[in-house]
Amino acid sequence: MLAPLGAIGIALVALGLLLLLLGADPLRALGALMGGAFGDRNALENTLLRMCPLLLVGLGVALAFRCGVWNIGGEGQLYLGALAASALATRVLPDAPALLLLPLVVLGGALAGALWGGIAAALRVGRGVSEVLSTILLNFVALLLVAYAVHGPLQEASGAYPQSDLFPLAAQLGLLPGTGRVHSGLVLALLLPAALWFGLFRTAAGLRLRAVGLAPEAARYAGIRPERELVRVLLISGGLAGLAGALEVSGVTGRLFENLSSGYGFTAIAVALLARLHPLGVLPAAAFFAALSTGSGAMQRVAAVPAVTVQLLEALVILISASFALPRRTD
Amino acid sequence: MDAGTLALLLSLLRLTTPLCIAAMGELVAERAGVLNIGIEGMMLVGALVAFAVGVSTGSGLLAVLGGISAGAALAALFAAFVLWRGADPIVCGAALNLFALGATGTFYRVLFPPELGHATAPQPGALVFVVLTGLLVLGVGLFLARTRLGLALRAVGERADAAHAQGVRVLRIRWAATLFGGACAGLAGATLVLWIADTFVEGMTSGRGFIALALVLFGGYRPLRIVAGALLFGAASALQFRLQARGLEIPYGLLLMTPYLLTLAVLALFASRVRPPADLARPFRPRV
Amino acid sequence: MTQVALRNVYKRFAATEALRGANLELEPAEIHALLGENGAGKSTLVRVLYGLVEPDRGEVRIDDEPVSITSPHHALALGIGLVHQHFMGVPALSVAENLMLGQHGSLARRHAAACELLERYQLGLDPDRPAGELAVAEQQRLEIVRALGRDVKLLILDEPTAVLAPSEVELLLAWLSGLREEGRTVLLISHKLTEVSSLCDRVTVLRHGLNVITREVAGLDAAQLGRFMLGEAPPPPGQPPQTQPGQVALRLEAVRAQGLSGIELELRSGEILALGGIDGNGQGPLEQVLAGVRTLHSGSIELLCPPLALLSGERERTGLVLELAIEENLALPQAAHRHGFLSPRALRGSALDMLQRFGIRARPELPARVLSGGNQQKLCVARALCGGPGVLVAVNPTRGLDVAGTALVREEIRSLTASGCAVLLISTDLDEVLELGNRIAVFFRGALLPLDPAHHDRAEIGRLMLGEGAA
């Protein structure tokens, strides 16, 4: 528990020093940040909305890392989920019965993300390709697929902008009662940390996954097949990211376009590491980075500190977190 | 040589050269056992710094030096966390890429807002960079195979604890190799703004760093084979534009994926046949 | 350098105190033996001298000047050399390149020096061959010659004779004598008492991280040395269990794989079949084939009395997941095949039972890395035994264990046979093979040479180990 707080603390201090160097007032900047993240109802809702994809993709990344699988492809898997969801909602199934449409759209997104992760898994298990490279390359491909789709097959009927049609109402996520913009998908996302914690620490499957991540050879000799666990975890990890993408298009934007994700897939890596790869820790970590993201705009406006410093902070948090031992291989 | 062939050759060299430069740097780092996936970010900061220095001083030489220094500086940050603190290299590399993307984007917008008009960097010319690349490839090849330090470096990448036990200074060599890799990545970034294009665009590396990583693997960790791989890659990418020009019925949006799909295909074919340095990316503890 | 001294050295690794105030005083031009059983701290102590281990407390003095040796580079500069227990070369580099590493001068000069070294010591190795392709014994000889080639004033050898044939051991001892004549000092770690008494001038005995005694070897006999090492008379060697072999539990027919040229064996319930041999003749491949990790090229393996439990030879790499809890390690084999929930209470309960039975005093929720090497090995044994296996494959089950631990594990294996389990013992320890094997066979170049039951003795096994009597 000490390590994540320590990482944040050190990173904040480093950031504060940098800000002083640039001539800005660190306390004012921090105040603006907090205000932008939690100051009013609008800000809070923004933070919650950004927390959802960070939470989902972060959980997937944490699981994968724990299995010794470097899934850097969260961004691409998210986009593919958004793409599939949009295709289903606007082209393939728009006339499906209202009750089925939303679940199918969301499910389709998750499956597409899982498929994208599965490609990397197949390349690793079948052809010995490092998933680090394959997931990163697949990110580029996914982004280009979305660009192609919104300029072409999925483009809105009017052809005015490179974006998909607006989702039919039945395919849009409902809002949580009492909120202006927070979609109900968040509820699902909030349930997952506990569920995944249980799966990781109270089931045989979870023990296998952890063993493979910590000592694959010892796991193999105990009768576990690391390849199987690897494939499973990439499917789950990709599926969670795809789910995040589906929720983004059906709950936040209502349609598909490029630059839909503000780097959620990469920030999720920071989230997972800050959480020390623990499912329950991903929740506060996702909240922290969501707050940083929404607050950064205010920080720029009010304290004249460029928003990029948030990315610098993210990178510092990753670097510092990585310096403390993670529950990973120690050979 | 007629104008058409010359143009073709130049086009091929443009696509190949930055990849070669970055790959040579990463080759040295990986042969020393350091896996640096952050060269994408180092290339990007190299491009921006080369651009900024070039525009403000007008000197191509200073711009190149600026790019090299920027890449090396980021590599130093990487080395500090990975080699001193024992942090995981994949994670740190990913973090640096993240940082570089954001930092270059913002600093570019701050330093070169659109009101200032379109700035261009000095263009020293193709010959300079091609010759530089050739010397680099030759130098790295000779270094690894024929020098004392090269032997020590190879030992460190294959089995660091054994090299350490024989009195080799493992951490020093890994630091130097990492800085060299970052410097090369920065140089590759510089060639992007000083030759390939004449200006900086956010995210302009477009994954070249990762392709360079794949090329190191594809080339079996040998300099000349890596160059051959880069040339093949360049040729295939050039083909992509030719196909488009011929009016082939593949949508432009999909053609853009070619480099990445090609890299994936190459990896799929060759990854299992190549043996990386045995101690690559594994932690090293000199003294317990 | 005339004198090297280690004084009052303390070193703790996680849960174990390896050194508790150990001392070592070396004189010039002597061959000094460092004796002690497994886990006594011998390796740790010399690694302090070589800059690989940083002591928590204590000092190192060279010529009565305190010095802190921070790295092997530093040690070599001071004139200290170390021959490691296991090959410390770079497998991917050639023999010559390995010898050239860390030397001075141009590559050409180093290469010439390397070839000259190979000649001088008559190693008979091809200088351009990758060191990883050498046999284990050849690698060890290379390791020794490399150290001899350096101009060191103090040469430390950590159990150098484990994989050498008797004639090679004699050669080594002659070389070491030569060093003494040149005025250099030799520190020899061993637990082979005969080598000690024939060659060494003085001996220091370590027990549990402390010295017990330092004195001249002259006048000491093996029994006395053994008593110093253990603190008491060593237990008499055990006997193989008396049982009636039952039905065939495991059958291997014409098994061929990489490293195995045709294995035939039939193992019956209630018996111990012990497979001995020099390391590198097929033990590893057979273990991997039985673990399902190495593919068969041809032949068949029939398991007629499941389940098969494997006690693997390298507990750090293939035995335990050190970062997982002790109770989770115990549950790992079941988790491999089950789908379902793990009840924390059930896990804890069965773990506590096992820990008590094997005398491991640790809380089951702690990660396995907190255990000492000996306790880790006991944990592996516990895990292998707890499923009530029909067949147990035990590979070097007492490696690294002290005498008490060794006796415990061997007793557990014996009592397994009483309950009808079949035991396949693969061990490079000759004593263990003789002590436990109802039937014995010897590995030689990937095949098994059976031992005549009337001749279960060292001489006969020694012959088979060298391939004499092979069909």
Image: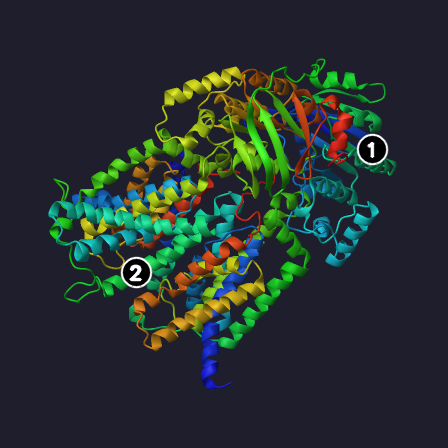
Q: Nearer the viewer, residue C150 or C160?
A: C160
Residue A103, image x, y percentages: 19, 45
Q: Is residue C348 visible?
A: yes
Type of residue at label 1?
Pro
Type of residue at label 2?
Leu
Residue C167, image x, y percentages: 81, 35
Residue C402, image x, y percentages: 64, 22
Asked if C117 appears above or below B110 in the picture, the reply is above
Give the label on residue A145, or none: 2
The residue identified by callout 1 is: C28
Q: Residue at x 55, y 55 (%)?
A: B29
Please, which residue is most extreme toward the top here?
Answer: C232
Element at label 2: helix
Q: Residue at x 43, y 60 (%)?
A: B265
Which chain letter goes with mark 2?
Answer: A
Residue B279, image x, y percentages: 57, 47
Q: Is residue B198 visible?
A: no
Q: Nearer the viewer, residue A251 or C398?
A: C398
Element at label 1: loop
